[in-house]
Image (tube, coloured by chain):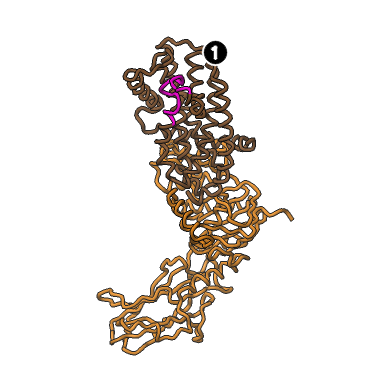
Chain colours: A brown, B orange
Amino acid sequence: MLEAIRNTWRHRDLIVSFTLRDIKARYKQTGLGVTWAIVQPLSMMVVFTLVFSVFAKVPSDGLPYPIFAYSGLIFWTFFANSLTGGTLAMVANSPLIRKIYFPRETLLVSVLLASTFDLGIALLLFAAMFLYYKVALTITVLWMFPLLALQMLLTLGVTGLSSAAHVNYRDIGHALPLLTQLWMFATPVAYPIRVIPEWLKPLYMLNPMAPIIDGYRRAFLLGQAPDLPALAVSAAITVALSALALAVFKRAELTFADVI
Amino acid sequence: MAQPVIELNNVSKRYRLRRGWHVKSIRDEVERLAKRLIMRGAPTRDDFWALKDVTFALEKGEVLGLVGRNGAGKSTLLKILSHVTVPTTGSFVARGRLGALIEIGAGFHPELTGRENVFLNGSIMGMSRREVQEKFDRIVAFAEIERFIDTPIKHYSSGQQMRLGFSVAAHVDPEILLIDEILAVGDASFQAKCLNKLAELKEDDKTIILVSHNLSNITDYAKRVVWLDGGSVRMIGESNEVVDAYLEHVTSDGVTGEAKSTESTFDPDRDLAIGEVVVRNRDEVVQDRFDRGETVLIDVSYAARRAMPGAVFVVSIQDLHGYPLGGIATDPDSMKVNAAVEQGVLRLKLDPILFTKGAYTLSVHAMDPVTKRYYDIRRRAARILVDGHRATSREASGHIHYPHQWEHIR
């Protein structure tokens, strides 16, 4: 694991180049440019507000539903986009992989960093919403950083497995949008965690994204620390998953060029 | 002696034809598993060995040429050397930073500008961004793209893209350099630049592996050559020796053997059929190796069903790549061939032969000069190897050694 981190650091310039490519290429020849980074979570927020708040009256912990939903949506969008991008990264770069050697995991890290850029843009709107809804920020907002770190490690773990699998089985690419969608509904993005029935909760909290998204909401909107025991479980799962992913990915990487 | 920079020991590479070359789906995989359970132990698919037991080593500063036909395993070997893939069995060690002038520009993104792509491609090839920054002006100047450097690369011509790609790769400054078809890039003047760059790298004591279909490039730069054939090393050694043997092998392919009976080569359904084509020296002894200036006799046998006084015979000469170097026809020489029912032998005398060192193939066809209809074509019917102490090498490029004199006139 340490060796992997060191190796990634050694190739930081390559990661920077890939990240810049991903960000620049994404918004070239678009009218809205980086505004697209906001459009996605914003439109989801509008839809969710209509469906879950206006039609279905889902509770939102006493907060205005739009900011409640948006607080989950921006971080979920970050996760979903880097998950999709990372899974497809190897195949998307197959001309490169077939011809040039470079550590393949740099592609995963760059996808993640490029999505982080989008997250930054989306956070600007988040800040504006704080002013509009007059929600006070407290010091607990600093929890954002460990939560982000955990989420990013989880993303790398999942994409390490899914991208390697996608090289061999293109089925992954087809199943991905569906799985991401299902995963979102198994995560407290559109609704608060307390609507989950008690009997289901132990199972529900095994989803490592659940305490993370819930954690952001507590940190930003409720002035609370995350649910630490649940977060510890999430962290344990994440670390185990990433270690497995690293081993699998480094092994699979050797034959990417042959099968891609 | 210092450790070799590159070492390959019994390197073999297997591709699985059915599995590897198609994208698998989980359904296929389940099917395959089921089959394997039923027919236990039986090999379930065709394996293809792209490389078999390849062993060689390179010292620092050595230039090694790699020759072989398409499909001989050159690309697979380059992939292994550049770490893109791993050998199935055997071991491979490379000591030092490796650069590859293969598939240059593979990392280009069409939407990005030339400048952005230089940085991107540079870091893919292992340079740091600072290093690219330092070399940036030289890279752009070498590629001759200064004016367009801030234009998205999708607006570049393919030649411009390749030049920029080559230029980035050439400035990586590796210790080991893999070069595939250096002359495939750009126009003549850019090619000259590439060759100069190659000479420069060689002088800098870089270890170089050079793949080219242009064999004179190989003999010019490489001291040793590996000849790959069907995935195995067919021959390894001093470059002229290996290239000559390779040439002989390539050109002898499809050439009518002298031993073959003449009758059997005629096609009875044709009005006129060309049979054996035999090359002889001035003493009418069958021979295919000549020195420059010698006399070559080319005997073309034919058979015709009926008399065809108008038939024109053409002997054309090609270089190794099949590029035509000239055709010699019977009709402008008003040599009337009275093709009769019985067989005949037509003799073409080349005196002297002016070709530079190398291998040449002869093709013969017979046609009706009015309708331009071919009676028969024999491609690569025979070959001539030009070799010997008078034969000039192809340094000045080109195949013909003109009779000439130099003098100072002023």
Left-right relation of A44 to B36: left
Above or below residue B207? Residue B267 is below
Inspect this view and state whether residue B163 appears: no
Position in image of residue A36 (x %, y %) = 38, 27
Q: Compared with residue B217, is residue A4 higher up or lower down, i.e. above or below?
A: above
* Image position of B81 (left or right of B338): right
The disc labelled 1 sits on which kind of residue?
A: Ile
Instruction: Quarter of the image for the N terminus of chain B: give it.
Output: bottom right
Based on the displayed image, in which of its 4 quarters is residue B375 positioned? bottom left
Residue furthest out toward the front: A199
Q: Which residue is mark 1?
A: A139
Image: B33 above or below A79: below
Depth check, front residue: A57 or A92 = A57
Q: Quadrant of residue B236?
A: bottom right
Residue A116 image point, x, y percent: 49, 28
Examine the structure image and report whether residue A195 is included in the region drawn in magenta: yes
Kindly identify the residue that appears in the image at 39 percent across and 33 percent down: A28
Kindly indicate the quadrant of the structure image that contains residue B133: top right
Outermost residue on the left side: it is B371
Provide residue A231's location: percent of width, then percent of height.
55, 24
Residue displayed at 60% across by 60% down: B222
Viewer-closest of B314 and B226: B226
Query: Please, which chain is the residue tagged with disc 1 on?
Result: A
The residue nearer to you, when weighing A203 against B115, is A203
Under circle 1, the secondary element is helix
**Residue A243 painted magenta:** no
Q: Taking A153 as reference, is B161 left or right? A: left
Image coordinates of residue A58 in percent, x first then y, are 38, 19
**Compared to B178, does A60 lie above or below?**
above
Find the magenta span and give its range: A183-198
